[in-house]
Image: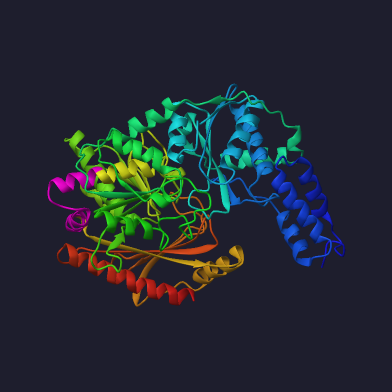
Amino acid sequence: MTLDQAEDGGAVEEARAWIAQDPDAQTRDELQALLDAAASDPAAAAELEERFAGRLDFGTAGLRGELGAGPTRMNRVLVAQAAAGLAAYLRARQEHPTVVIGYDGRTNSGVFARDSAALLQGAGVHATLLPRELPTPVLAFAVRHLDASAGIMVTASHNPARDNGYKVYLGGLDHGSQIVPPADAAIQAEILRVAAGSIADLPRDEDYTIASEDLVAEYVRRTAAPAEHTAVPPYVYTAMHGVGWQTASAVFAAAGFPPPVSVRAQQDPDPAFPTVSFPNPEEPGALDLAVATARDAGAQLIIANDPDADRLAVGIPDSSADTGWRRLAGNEVGWLLGWQAARRVDALTPDGGDGTLAASLVSSPALGEVARQTGLDYEETLTGFKWISRVARLVFGYEEALGYLVDPDKVRDKDGISAAVAVLDLAASLRAEGRTLADELLAFAAEFGGYASGQISIRVQELDDEIGRMMARLRERPPAEVGGIRVERIDDFADGFAPFPPNDILRLHLEGGARVIVRPSGTEPKLKCYLDAWSTEGEAAERIARAEAVVAVLDSGMRSLLA
């Protein structure tokens, strides 16, 4: 059916109103072309209806979505509404609020950031814009360093090239962490009030502050400071077409590390991400160029940031792998950095550890064992650094999706550059002993047990319906076993599971200490299963092999259950 034939032409009127207020010629033209085509083309009419069928909600991850015209896409109208809504929220909380704004190298990131600065300044919120494209951790640092009321980072992190996003941090009692409920709902309510009118009526003031390079230099200094060892083995660094290179290389130099061999084709920001199908170092093939560079350079280590440099991937030589290299799992890096952090606490407080190690509940339980044996507290949180960063007396926190918080006094968010410093420092200390990160993983298994993890991601077409049906089926017919391993207990978080609020999560405890957690992804149309096992039988390598064998059984069993 075309719009001419439709009984409800609401999308047509909404599209015309959108075009009238849109300051971006490209999205105005895009929407006008769609509007014109919808008069005779059913496909265009359906797309127009979809563009105005709702809007991107401002949640605990802020905004994130595909670039394009209309309220279900990321664009200058939606960003203006978000900035004005945030301004109203801040003005209600504080008489003279301040905001610091950062942006990465994605399409329109700078435009969205400058729009936000002018609109916040026009609304009576003093705005400071970072001086250039910079990593997300620099913005998170700036919120605390400048004692700002809030921070905005324009980034879609490791999402596809067509996406962009808008993350919000709060200062004051939130200490520079990302927003959590009820702040997200309160900001969304203000955004909806703004959206009832036209952004053309919003006051703008271009007289906002541009932060000096001194702020970036202070981030570099603080990030480099914890490094104690400088004899790093030869290493390769990739920025994954993002904004990490300039800042990370400055940090490495300030730490006294030798310069890395850069993956030149991925060194500079490029919003098209031309050498990767998906700009996420977790994805298969994303590190192929880094591996090729490492082989050519005779390197012994790969350090990779995602495009906004808040995540870290680490590669090490492995003769059993097809490429001769393997990427360490996020949990493996988390174990090693957590152990490193615990030893540093012990060195500073020889009479007993003081502090907390933390991980998201879908991360490996290995860090909890480190805490137990080293006398530190341990806390599990819901997924997301907005929760990890709020843990009291935090020493180190991580989540298995390559996110690590190694310096809570400086940044209350994951920081891929700080984590890289910690990994390089560890590699240098091991090199002085004639050992490698692979040797340290064996030492970890000997000390704490052999741990193994796996993950199943089932992508669906209809997010709510298909994933809802799969979760309902597991609840209605809870499995008695997974791959022949008996299920001893199931924790259902649907109605809340202390200390967590209600969440669509199932946690299966299996015989022998294995564990399976099932949950919908918070950012993609996927159902995710997290598989964990551990063993203390035999020597270190045997312990790891036993745990990996159990994870393989769990993987096969869960795929059968969800088929």
Vertical arrangement, residue 55 with respect to residue 49, above or below: above
- Magenta-colored segment: predominant secondary structure: helix
Q: Is residue 560 above or below residue 119?
A: below
- Identified at 46% across, 40% down, the residue is 136
**Is 337 on the left or on the right of 157, as rendered?**
left
Vertical comparison of 365 with 410: above or below: below
Q: Foreground residue, 282 or 168? A: 282
User: Residue 518: image x %, image y %?
Assistant: 45, 63
Which region is colored magenta?
425-447
Horizontally, residue 531 falls left or right of residue 24, namely: left
Above-or-below relation of 248 to 511: above
Q: Is residue 315 visible?
A: yes
Residue in front for this viewpoint, 285 or 452: 285
Rendered residue at 15%/52% (across/down): 435
The residue nearer to you, when weighing 212 against 334, is: 212
Residue 347 percent across, percent down from the top left: 18, 37
